[in-house]
Amino acid sequence: DAGITQSPRHKVTETGTPVTLRCHQTENHRYMYWYRQDPGHGLRLIHYSYGVKDTDKGEVSDGYSVSRSKTEDFLLTLESATSSQTSVYFCAISPGAGNTGELFFGEGSRLTVL
Amino acid sequence: EDKVVQSPLSLVVHEGDTVTLNCSYEVTNFRSLLWYKQEKKAPTFLFMLTSSGIEKKSGRLSSILDKKELSSILNITATQTGDSAIYLCAASYNTDKLIFGTGTRLQVFP
């Protein structure tokens, strides 16, 4: 199994509070992604990174920011959480550079915003 | 707008049945079509298809891509209760980005 660790795995927070989810990989893969999964919507890309300090937006990036200061860590931050951000968040990694899209996923982080 | 559509949304079968899951895509700069299986947690990779008409097989599972019809199917023969899961289809485009369908929930009963 790909070495991907997400933390925290479960979090309950209140509207308006900041939240940071962490993804840590031991595979030295170039690409890292944050997805959210909601019923009826499948997996939707929030942000992704193609290298240290290189990030870009996905299809549902509003309300989220990311940072990647080291190859192994990719942080997802909700500056002011809202109830619509209640979801399961998955981190994924990919070696990139000619890889045609296979991703390896972490176990997910369930976030509940009250 | 890029999109991936899966059908049916849900499927209930008995052990031993054969099922076919469908995936259609409209994606700019298409590169490959991928299938994942999601049980309780993380999606796990099943197949990646890049060439039209070439079947990929893994045990009782097989999949094929039709680039002319912009579609793919995933077949599962002699289903078992362990096949119960959500099956996700995704299209790869541009530089290592995937767009996912909403998935097909398969339930296999004894």
Image (cartoon, coloured by chain):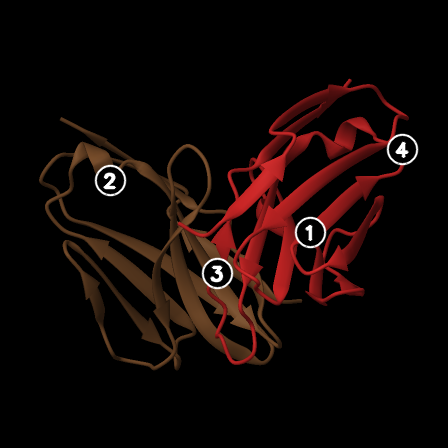
Chain colours: A red, B brown
| Label 1 sits on residue | A73
Mark-to-mark CA distance, 1 and 4: 22 Å
Q: In the image, what residue occupies the spot 22% across and 35% down?
A: B82
Q: Which mark is residue B83?
A: 2
At horizontal 52% and vertical 80% (from top left) the residue drawn is A98
The three-letter code of the residue at mark 4 reads Ser
Compared across the picture, whether A16 is left or right of B38 comes to right
Q: Are marks 1 and 3 on the same chain?
A: no
Q: Which of B75 and A26 is in front in this view?
A: A26
Which amino acid type is shown beneath numbered disc 3? Ala
Please name which of the two marks, 1 or 4, marks the residue nearer to the observer. Answer: 1
Of the two numbered discs 2 and 3 on the same chain, state the one appearing first in sequence: 2
Q: Name the residue under label 3.
A: B90
| Disc number lying in front (4 or 3) | 4
Q: Are marks 4 and 2 in contact (CB under 8 Å)?
A: no
Task: Write down the residue under mark 4.
Answer: A80
Q: Nearer the viewer, residue B81 or A78?
A: A78
Residue A37 visible in this rendered orientation of the protein = no
Q: Which amino acid does label 1 sit on?
A: Asp
How far apart marks 4 and 2 lie (CA) works out to 40 Å
Tell me the element at label 3. Answer: strand
Q: Which element is circle 4 on?
A: loop
How many angstroms separate mark 1 from mark 2 (CA)? 33 Å
Mark 1 belongs to chain:
A
Of tags 1 and 3, the one toward the viewer is 1
User: Looking at the figure, which quarter contains the N terminus of chain B?
Assistant: bottom right
**Disc 4: host chain:** A
Query: Decide: marks 2, 3 in contact (CB < 8 A)?
Result: no
Three-letter code, disc 2: Asp
